Amino acid sequence: MDFTLIFENIGIYFTGLQNTVVLVSISLVLGLLLAVPLAVLLNYGNNSIRLPIRAYIYFFRGTPLLVQMFLVYYGFGQFDLIKDSLLWPFFKEAYFCALFAFTLNTGAYTAEILRGAIKATNHGEIEAAMAAGMSKLLMIRRIILPSAFRRALPAYSNEIIFMLHGSALASVITIVDITGAARIINSRYYSPYEAFVTAAVFYMTLTFIIVFLVKKLEVRWFAHLQPQSNNPAIEAPP
């Protein structure tokens, strides 16, 4: 096993690392911005609003991410309506197609995670907000959503990791991500073991960083639930 060729071409992996981090980060941010209003509407909207949202979530949770990406990358070019529109300069680019598919995919999963977290809101919190004279919109913004985000954090951390691993599919449509870098090294030197073990190390390192940051966030968000003697964030009374 010779990793010399990896060290000689490590720049390709760092390019892939940058593309992976940027692609996944933007997808997660846009997916979260999409998921929050959808989750709220699923809990508080009427049936005519909930039905198309449920159809969207069902489609993207019920089909593989690879199929969704192929539908966007290869399928949209078949429609003259898209090819003749201002959107075509975007959809003819592989990077934008992957970003679009990833955003819709993670948006669907995140919306379902938040829907369950909002539904599990303690009724006492809602009654207290109503007793304080809050409007429904203010109650959602100040009470329900912050509480739901705390409950959803463990499940959402898994979604972040799944999205990171799913991003490896971007290499199928010519994007040089971490997996794409490994495929380039393998095609040049016919060394699949060295090439893909290196990619695995990059993915594991990113996963470790994600888990570490989420744990830190959990400690901060759930500090009020920790015993006072074990919680440095709460000062002992004099």
Image (tube, rainbow, N blue to C red):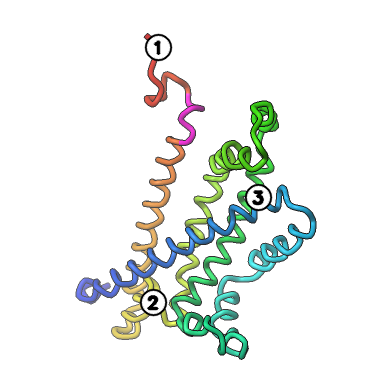
Q: CA distance from mark 3 to mark 2?
A: 37 Å
Nearest the eye: 147 or 218: 147
In the image, is residue 233 above or below residue 86?
A: above
x then y, percent, for residue 64: 61, 71
Which mark is in front, 3 or 2? 3
Q: Quadrant of the rendered structure where residue 144 is?
A: top right
Badge 2 or badge 1: first in the primary sequence:
2
Residue depicted at 59% across the width and 36% down the height = 143
Q: Dot 1, crowdedness within 10 Å: few (<14), some or many (≥20)?
A: few
The N terminus, quarter of image: bottom left
Give whichever of 48, 235 is nearer the camera.
Answer: 48
Q: Earlier in the sequence, mark 3 or mark 2?
A: 3
What is the span of residues highlighted in magenta in the rendered image?
A: 221-226
Q: Amino acid at mark 3?
A: Val
Which-is-in-front pick, marks 2 and 1? 1
Residue type, numbered disc 2: Gly
Q: Where is residue 51 shown, x and y percent of the image?
A: 76, 61
Looking at the rendered structure, the secondary structure element under dot 1 is loop
For label 1, the residue is 237
Label drawn at residue 180 = 2
Point out residue 27 in the picture as x, y percentages from the top left corner. 48, 64
SS assignment for the magenta stretch, majority: helix
Specify whether 45 is left or right of 161. Answer: right
Is residue 224 inside the magenta stretch?
Answer: yes
- In this view, the residue in front, 152 or 144, is 144
Q: Which residue is tagged 3?
A: 40
Number of numbered discs overlaid on the protein picture: 3
Question: Is any part of residue 2 visible from this angle?
Answer: no
